[in-house]
């Protein structure tokens, strides 16, 4: 299941994001979205977990929690609308 995470600290690394979610199950990928021009974090990312049960557990535990001093929002990622 793909999870959308927003409100991320700009200094957060991919490894730290993966570590925060791995406490709830197996993380298959973690990505922090970066600005194309500056290569700076845009403050959001995606985490993919191999089981829906683990993903829902992580969402309920981490939504509105603090990560490196910032409150994060965690929810099921929605499919992107075609352009």
Image: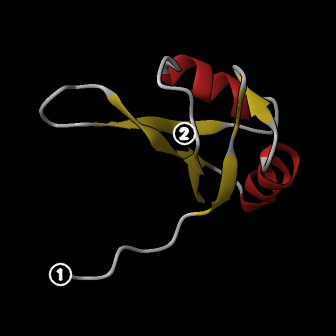
Where 82 falls versus 55 (above or below)? below
Sequence-wise, which precedes: disc 1 or disc 2? Answer: 2
Q: Is mark 2 on a helix, strand or loop?
A: strand
Q: Position of residue 29 (x, y in %)?
A: 49, 38
Q: Position of residue 28 (x, y in %)?
A: 54, 39
Residue at 71% over, 54% down: 51
Q: Quarter-wise, where is residue 25 in the image?
A: top right
- Mark 2 is surrounded, within 10 Å at the Cα level, by few (under 14), some (14 to 19) or many (20 or more) other residues, namely some
Residue at 62% over, 37% down: 27
Left or right, 37 with respect to 1, comes to: left
- Mark 1 is surrounded, within 10 Å at the Cα level, by few (under 14), some (14 to 19) or many (20 or more) other residues, namely few
Residue at 42% over, 35% down: 32
Q: Position of residue 37 (x, y in %)?
A: 12, 32
Q: How many marks?
A: 2
Q: Position of residue 44 (x, y in %)?
A: 48, 43
Q: Which residue lies furthest to the left in this view?
A: 37
Q: Nearer the viewer, residue 61 or 22?
A: 61
Let me know if residue 18 appears in the view. yes
Q: Which of marks 1 and 2 is in front?
A: 1
**Mark linked to residue 5:** none
Q: Is mark 1 on a helix, strand or loop?
A: loop
**Mark linked to residue 83:** 1
Where 36 falls versus 12 (above or below)? below
Q: Which residue lies furthest to the bottom in this view?
A: 82
Marks 1/2: CA–CA distance? 27 Å
Q: Do the residues labelled 1 and 2 touch (CB within 8 Å)?
A: no
Let me know if residue 22 appears in the view. no
Q: Quarter-wise, where is residue 4 in the image?
A: bottom right
The quarter in which the C terminus is drawn is bottom left
Residue holding disc 2: 28
Residue at 85% over, 55% down: 60
Q: Nearer the viewer, residue 3 or 66?
A: 66
């Amino acid at each position: 299941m793909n999870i959308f995470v927003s409100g991320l600290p700009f200094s957060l690394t991919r490894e730290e994001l993966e570590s925060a979610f791995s406490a709830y199950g197996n993380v298959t990928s973690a990505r922090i979205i970066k600005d194309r021009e500056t290569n700076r974090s845009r403050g959001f990312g995606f985490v993919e977990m191999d089981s829906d049960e683990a993903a829902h557990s992580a969402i309920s535990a981490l939504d509105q929690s603090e990560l490196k001093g910032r409150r994060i929002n965690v929810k099921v990622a929605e499919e992107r609308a075609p352009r």
